[in-house]
Image (cartoon, helix red, strand yellow):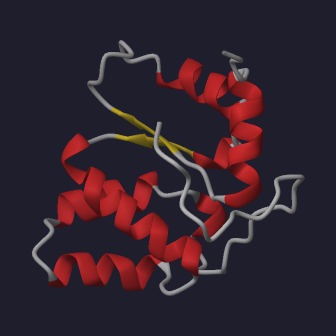
Amino acid sequence: MRYLPTKTAFAELQEKYNTFFILPKGASHGGAIRELREVWGGYINPEHVLALDDPNAAAELIATQIGLCEGVTDLDSASADLAAHGTSQALVSVVRASVSKAYTGGEIARVTTGTLAPTSSTPAKRL
């Protein structure tokens, strides 16, 4: 079995996808957010390493980040939508502080062109 180095795996992943890593406060990383941001920033775009001050806002952060990456919302609209659907102002503030600043304007995020071959429409065989 051949193992793919982590750096290579993430480089290939980013050729097709906008890749993020969320560092929730209070997780088992012992509060070393700055150090972990540096480590993960070496694997993916440093703007895509998201520190989350309240793990209860994880779903809202993910949904907001997807909307920003797809260009279907901006940060103000996403915040208003969250509040309109019952998210507390405290969690809305956490999401606003945690999203990637590269996408806060609602511009469509395009992944870089890489060397990966297009995926086949034929499902892979299960082993």
**Residue 124 placement (x, y as % from top left):** 56, 53
- The residue drawn where x is 74% and y is 27% is 7
Is 126 situated above or below 60? Answer: above
Residue at the farthest left position = 86
Is 91 situated above or below 71? Answer: above
80 sits to left or right of 19 = left
- The residue drawn where x is 39% and y is 86% is 77
Is 79 situated above or below 22? Answer: below
**Residue 36 placement (x, y as % from top left):** 55, 22
Which quadrant of the structure image shows residue 30?
top left
For the N terminus, the quadrant is top right
Q: How many marks?
A: 0
Question: Looking at this view, is 12 or 81 the one in front?
Answer: 12
- The residue drawn where x is 62% and y is 29% is 40
85 sits to left or right of 73 = left
**Residue 9 placement (x, y as % from top left):** 70, 34
Which quadrant of the structure image shows residue 62?
bottom left
**Residue 45 placement (x, y as % from top left):** 71, 45
- The residue drawn where x is 15% and y is 69% is 87
Question: Looking at this view, is 18 or 114 the one in front?
Answer: 114
52 sits to left or right of 88 = right
